[in-house]
Image: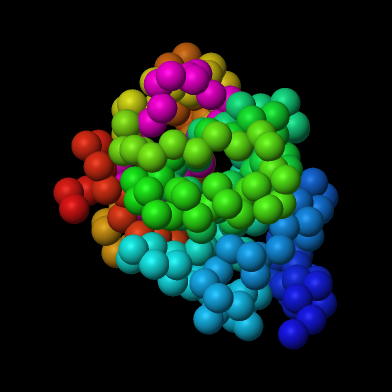
């Protein structure tokens, strides 16, 4: 299979045609081989317009959703980012191309270890992987310029808002454990100004400030 051609088609047909215009985001997606982040048996499906299972009941997000969430953060290159939900590591790798540092938290050690191997294979050196409860954020390196949550929450955890810098942004799916709205919040004077980017479906954010397992 010609993965490079499949990646080009994905960018043109699934992402650009749906309104993703940020050139830095498009270039980052072009640089990262999505086939490296799916299970071996799903390589041929890596560029389909849908999420795919990666084990432990988790998924790699639909390519368009990765692009949309990334574009929403309006990254300039100097940011320190917290990602909640490493999963396959694909979204993390995209963020690493656009920022100074990415701290990514995953509750399943097997997924975190697997993602770290992928980062090493691609020589992505500005990523730190952490195994833990992402609903609590990662206070050690806070405050962050931006936070991306790749799992659905019932509400935006206050712990994450607290760990955002002033004028920092958080992108997070909020709703039920089965269906959410994608919300972008900007922290202004310790409050969030929120914009809704429409419906989406993510696996639940499980943890102290998320859903009960």
Residue 36 in view of the camera: yes
Residue 146 in the magenta stretch? The answer is yes
Q: Nearer the viewer, residue 102 or 131?
A: 131
Give coordinates of residue 100: x percent, y percent: 70, 29
The residue located at (64%, 65%) in the rendering is 36
Residue 161 in the magenta stretch? The answer is no
Q: Nearer the viewer, residue 195 or 21?
A: 21
Give coordinates of residue 97: x percent, y percent: 73, 43
Q: Nearer the viewer, residue 174 or 90?
A: 90
The number of numbered discs placed on residues in the rendered structure image is 0
Answer left or right for 23 relative to 102. right
The residue located at (25%, 42%) in the rendering is 207
Quadrant in the rendering for residue 13: bottom right
Give the residue at the far top of this rendering.
Answer: 189
Q: Nearer the viewer, residue 73 or 186?
A: 73
Quadrant in which the N terminus appears:
bottom right
The image's colour scheme reads rainbow
Against 159, residue 67 (above or below) is below
The residue located at (80%, 72%) in the rendering is 4
Against 45, residue 64 (above or below) is above
Give coordinates of residue 16: x percent, y percent: 76, 64
The residue located at (37%, 48%) in the rendering is 109
The segment highlighted magenta reads 137-156
Against 211, residue 125 (above or below) is above
Give coordinates of residue 166: x percent, y percent: 53, 17
């Amino acid at each position: 299979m010609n993965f490079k051609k499949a990646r080009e088609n994905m960018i043109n047909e699934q992402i650009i045609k749906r309104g993703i215009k940020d050139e830095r985001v498009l270039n980052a997606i072009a640089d990262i081989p999505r086939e490296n982040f799916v299970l071996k048996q799903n390589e041929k499906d890596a560029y389909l317009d849908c999420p795919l299972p990666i084990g432990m009941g988790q998924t790699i997000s639909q390519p368009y959703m990765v692009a949309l969430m990334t574009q929403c953060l309006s990254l300039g290159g100097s940011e320190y980012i917290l990602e909640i939900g490493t999963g396959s590591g694909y979204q993390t790798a995209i963020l690493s191309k656009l920022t100074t540092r990415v701290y990514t938290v995953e509750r399943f050690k097997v997924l975190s270890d697997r993602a770290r191997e992928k980062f090493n294979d691609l020589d992505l050196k500005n990523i730190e992987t952490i195994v833990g409860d992402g609903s609590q954020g990662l206070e050690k390196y806070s405050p962050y310029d931006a936070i991306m949550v790749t799992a659905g929450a019932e509400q935006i955890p206050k712990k994450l808002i607290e760990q955002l810098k002033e004028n920092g942004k958080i992108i997070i799916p909020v709703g039920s454990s089965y269906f959410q709205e994608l919300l972008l919040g900007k922290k202004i004077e310790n409050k969030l100004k929120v914009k809704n980017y429409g419906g989406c479906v993510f696996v639940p954010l499980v943890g102290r400030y998320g859903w009960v397992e």
